[in-house]
Amino acid sequence: MSSISIPAEFTLHRKNIYNHTNANQWIVSHARPYLWIIVMIIVGAIGNAALAAYVPVLTGDAFNAMIQLPPDTSVLLPLAIIIGVSQIIRGVLQLGRNFGAELMAQYMERDIRDELYLSLLGKSMTFHNLQPVGDTMARATNDVREVNFMFNPGVNLVVGSFMFIVMLFAATPRYHPSLLITPTIFTIIYFVALARYLKTLAPITDEVRATFGDMNTHLSESLDGVEVMKGAAQEGAEVDRFVSNARRVRDSFVSQGDLEGRYIAMLILGAAYAGGLVHALLLFRAGTIDLGAVIAYFGLLRLLEFPTFTSTWAYSQISSGMSSARRILELINMETRLDQNASGLTSDMRGEVEFRGVSFSYPAGEPVIQDVSFKIKQGQTVAIVGQTGAGKTSLAKLINRTYDITSGQVLIDGVDVREWNLAALRSQISIIEQDIFLFSRSLSDNIAFGKPSASKDEITAASVASQAHDFILEFDQGYATVVGERGVTLSGGQRQRIALARAFLTDPRILVLDDSTSAIDSATEDKIQRAISNAARGRTTFIITHRLSQIRWADLIIVMRKGRIAAIGTHDELMKTSEAYSRIFRE
Ligand code: TTP
Ligand code: MG
């Protein structure tokens, strides 16, 4: 049916396909689709390492040929050609390994970014109100990037350099099996040291990522509140707070660097060279191996340089990547997602609304709505009035499940809102918020936000109905004017009419207009009044307002006081029965 083909503003369509709580499994499950790239990386790494090991082997052979009496120089040219060609092939394989790793890293980054974005859009407002934007931004940008770096250079170099160790083991027995002693001892110490290093490193990289997130949170909040900050002349204090956050980031990075610096691998590399050479010379003196073997063996030992050099930072790259993966996964799994109820009711709404003993409180807060009951017929206009903080906005947000109620029932057309398919519910209810948010896109895109397929004519018609057309044409670029660019901002009254135009386009069955601005000049007031009565025609409409002209004109008036209904009825009834209501009109 047509009305649900329009997506609700922020509803998750693709199910979270991975559903992991363990970061290792989560990463593996993301890597699995790219098995062919992993094969390419491994083949490239093996080939590259094998050909790197081939050079010292050939050098040893050349040496033996040269020290014969008389020297056999005829082998030199073919050897040189073989070395040259093999190193060209090696370059190609190395390219394959690097290319594969980069490809993998970028694919992973894209997939994780998509998943994170979708999961953020699918989360409830309760989540978004509690989670600092700066921290989310840090996770969505930097942490996702760290996962990219984990694959390239991280995994790339770890796999590549590990193959060098493997090749050393493969080539050494050719000369003498006992020569394996040095590489074996090296490898054992290398991996034991590495395991200990990674264990101490993990909490430090966690700390680095966390302090970075905190710094970002603070930065984004002070930019958001820059006007307040300047107004209160608090720049100095804010700078101090920022500096102290930045210092914490620096300190945690420095402690990571400190640990990396103390990593033992470089030391054991030196010891391995010395030990291996002594061993080879002893075998040579005993006549067990020839001089070419000594030369070749020493060349082979130098294969250990690559794993040693890369291990310091390639593994810490992986450690950082895993810290980031944990943070991203934590964000994805923060469980405040509304039940989408995909199998729920999707029929066309008529627009009857009923509250049955509804109570609601924000998480860990006092109840802001208590035991509210009322029933509204299809097409009626309802005014909700009450002092600031009475719970009017909160009440309205329960209708489309921006928040889920704590107890009681909200019914639309006699069906509990939780029984409705969330997308169907939201696409037929339009809430115009107290603070209207416009995207930094063109005015026509902003108007067509809930219905991207809308034609130009439809957009214009909606703007005419909402009284926005005239002021839009006053901009040089008209409907193409981009909000937020070159200083184009809209006044409260103008935003409201843009939002009304949005509502005209999506043609909701239920319209909620949260309009607590009362101070508007009478010409604008008149326009908005006309726009609202146009909008209210033919649909159930809630108007939260302080404007007496609108209140009087409603079919039903709900007076809220401290989260409860203080009075309910028509204007005439309430003037007679409600002291609280008639006071509003006397003031
Ligand atoms: P609102 O429902 O925002 O009150 P209101 O809309 O009647 O007020 P105004 O006329 O100023 O727009 O708030 C009711 C109570 O709920 C108030 O004590 C603040 C609290 N509250 C939260 O704790 N979290 C929220 O996200 C909101 C919107 C309100
Ligand atoms: Mg409000």
Image (tube, rainbow, N blue to C red):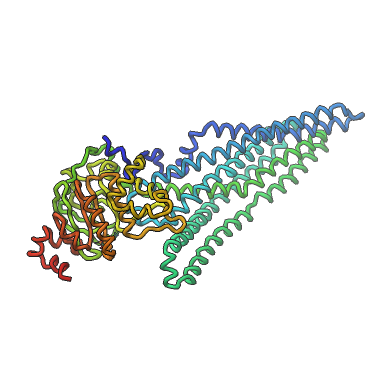
Residue 153 screen position, x and y as percent: 60, 44
Q: Residue 135 appears at what percent x and percent y?
A: 44, 55
Percent x, y for residue 60? 80, 34
**Do we see residue 405 in this rendering?**
yes
Please say if 23 is above or below 554.
above
Residue 273 lies left or right of residue 321; in this view the side is: right
**Residue found 36% across the figure and 57% down from its top:** 130
Is 529 left, or right, of 482 in this rendering? Answer: left
Q: Is residue 238 above or below residue 430?
A: below
Q: Quadrant of the C terminus?
A: bottom left
Which residue sits at x=43%, y=47%?
329
Whether residue 235 sits left or right of residue 119 in the image: it is: right
Q: Is 17 situated above or below 532? A: above
Name, please, the residue furthest toward the bottom: 233
Q: Observer-nearest residue: 24 or 100?
A: 100
Which quarter of the figure is the N terminus placed in?
top left
